[in-house]
Amino acid sequence: MEDNPEKKSLRNLLLEKRDRTSFDMMKIASEKISKKLKKIGLFKDAQKIGAYYPIGSEVLTQDIIQELLSNGKQVFLPRVSGEQMDFKKIRDFSSLENGSFDIMEPKIECKTENNLDVILVPTVGITPKGIRLGYGHGFYDKFLVNHKTITISLTLEKQVVKNIPKSDHDVLIDWIVTEDRIIETQR
């Protein structure tokens, strides 16, 4: 997917900023984000939830995933195949293997289900209006254009920025959860 220089520069800046967060601070922020996430009714009531396994300095989602599984929710993680991303159901963390981009993803034999109630979306940066900056590969945007669902960005407060250049293919995020607040974006 095409990536403009302004987005690339902002992505590098925000990743650098996020990467400077200590693991202890990330753990504390992730716990606060997890608590806030449970206050969103649409998330609490969802049965089929798309999540992601964190890489690098992303918000830690392992506890969220484990709690969802323990509560009997159906949990799906993305698996990339070529230019396409699909969500596959996991039973537990043993359903995962090292996949594309060195990301833990469901094994190929896991059942595909792209009709989900809610998807937690990894985020490098985001505006309060829901314009999201990802890693520049466009997998989530391509997926979300074809699968209408509630989207929730889990991100650090310092990753919420005033402006991100919006491309035609960018899909707006419905909710943003940081360690400090919950934002329902204006659609």
Image (spheres, helix red, strand yellow):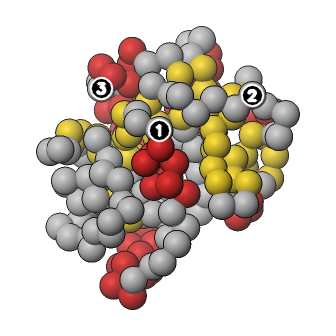
Q: How many marks?
A: 3
State how far apart marks 2 and 3 are (Cα): 27 Å
Circle on res. 111 = 2
- Residue sitting farthest toward the bottom: 5
Dividing the image into 4 quarters, which one contains the C terminus? top left
Q: Amino acid at mark 1?
A: His
Q: Residues within 10 Å of mark 2 (few under 14, many from 20)?
A: few
Residue 147's disc number: 1
Indicate whether 69 appears above or below 145: above
* Disc on the earlier residue, 1 or 3: 3
Q: Nearer the viewer, mark 1 or mark 2?
A: 1
Q: Nearer the viewer, mark 2 or mark 3?
A: 2
Tell me the quarter of the picture where residue 75 sits: top right
Answer with left or right where residue 5 lies relative to residue 162: right
Which label lies toward us, 1 or 3?
A: 1
Q: Residues within 10 Å of mark 3 (few under 14, many from 20)?
A: some
Which of the 4 image quarters holds residue 149?
A: top left
Q: Residue at x 36, y 60 (%)?
A: 170
The residue located at (14%, 45%) in the rendering is 186
For image coordinates 39% across by 88% down, the residue present is 5
Looking at the picture, how far across and down is residue 20, in whole percent? 46, 72
Rendered residue at 59%/51% (across/down): 54
